[in-house]
Image (tube, rainbow, N blue to C red):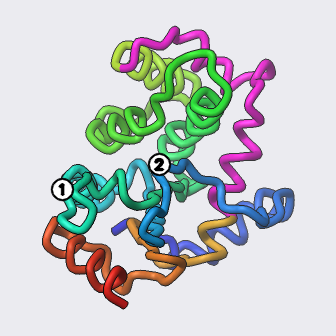
């Protein structure tokens, strides 16, 4: 679990301006899939560069694609699930990868390309080492390397991704990435991944399909 509590003092000293510039947003920055047809709303918070987020996501995705005998549909078709992200500003490689999230959110909402937010999330979680292992590399070189990888994996022009990091950014990416950080640290500041069901924080993030199924039925039957 990527923990942020141990770095609170350091972060407070090193990024006072960062902290003060962006207010806590009133609404949760998120990507939403499905509808709460059974009154069940899962809220997932990942750090895209957190090893625990990467390790636990496959069980969640398998659970969402499993058939729920109550509705005879997949779980994902019967519930609402939203994803938001907690980027740590004191890790360049973490910030760089999360700064593309607004681009993908806007593409999903406004086009013109196809929605690939979940594909980008999965790519990040499955390819963390390709950016986390890039030590002694300049920030500009890291941006070019990462956008080249994402471009090839998701068939997106690299130039579209690179503009996120420059003065021509049309997605307000820096501000919105800071909003992701501010909202989630204000809500729960112990580490990732963590999740809520209908606004209630899960004491432990489920690690298997069976554990997710138990959570689903406990909420459905309550």
Q: Element type at marker 1?
A: strand
Query: Which portion, as a residue range, is magenta?
Result: 154-182
Residue 168 among those drawn in magenta: yes
Q: Is residue 86 left or right of residue 53?
A: right
C-alpha span from label 2 to label 1:
17 Å
> Which residue in the rendered view is the most extreme toward the bottom?
222
- Tell me which corner region of the image, top left, top right, bottom left or bottom right, holds residue 19: bottom right
Give the image location of residue 50, x and y in percent.
36, 56
Q: Nearer the viewer, mark 2 or mark 1?
A: 1
- Residue beneath disc 1: 67
Res 165 → quadrant? top right
Residue 73 horizontal side relative to residue 105, left or right: left
Find residue 178 and report its horizontal and vertical position in percent: 70, 53
Q: What residue is drawn where x is 58% and y is 24%?
A: 140
Q: Label 2: which residue?
A: 33
Q: Observer-nearest residue: 98 or 194?
A: 194
């Amino acid at each position: 679990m990527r923990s942020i509590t141990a770095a609170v003092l350091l972060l407070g000293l090193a990024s006072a301006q960062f902290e003060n510039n962006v207010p806590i947003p009133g609404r949760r920055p998120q990507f939403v899939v499905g509808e709460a047809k059974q009154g069940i709303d899962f809220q997932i918070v990942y750090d895209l560069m957190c090893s625990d987020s990467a390790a636990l996501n496959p069980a969640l995705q398998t659970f969402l694609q499993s058939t729920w005998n109550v509705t005879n549909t997949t779980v994902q078709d019967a519930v609402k699930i939203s994803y938001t992200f907690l980027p740590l500003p004191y890790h360049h490689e973490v910030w760089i990868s999360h700064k593309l999230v607004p681009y993908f959110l806007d593409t999903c909402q406004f086009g013109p390309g196809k929605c690939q937010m979940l594909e980008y999330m999965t790519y990040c979680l499955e390819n963390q080492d390709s950016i986390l292992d890039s030590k002694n590399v300049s920030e500009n070189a890291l941006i070019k390397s990462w956008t080249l990888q994402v471009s090839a994996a998701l068939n997106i022009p690299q130039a579209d991704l690179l503009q996120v990091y420059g003065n021509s950014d049309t997605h307000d990416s820096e501000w919105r990435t800071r909003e992701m950080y501010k909202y989630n640290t204000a809500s729960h500041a112990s580490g990732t991944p963590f999740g809520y069901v209908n606004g209630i924080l899960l004491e432990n993030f489920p690690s298997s399909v069976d554990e997710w199924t138990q959570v689903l039925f406990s909420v459905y039957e309550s």
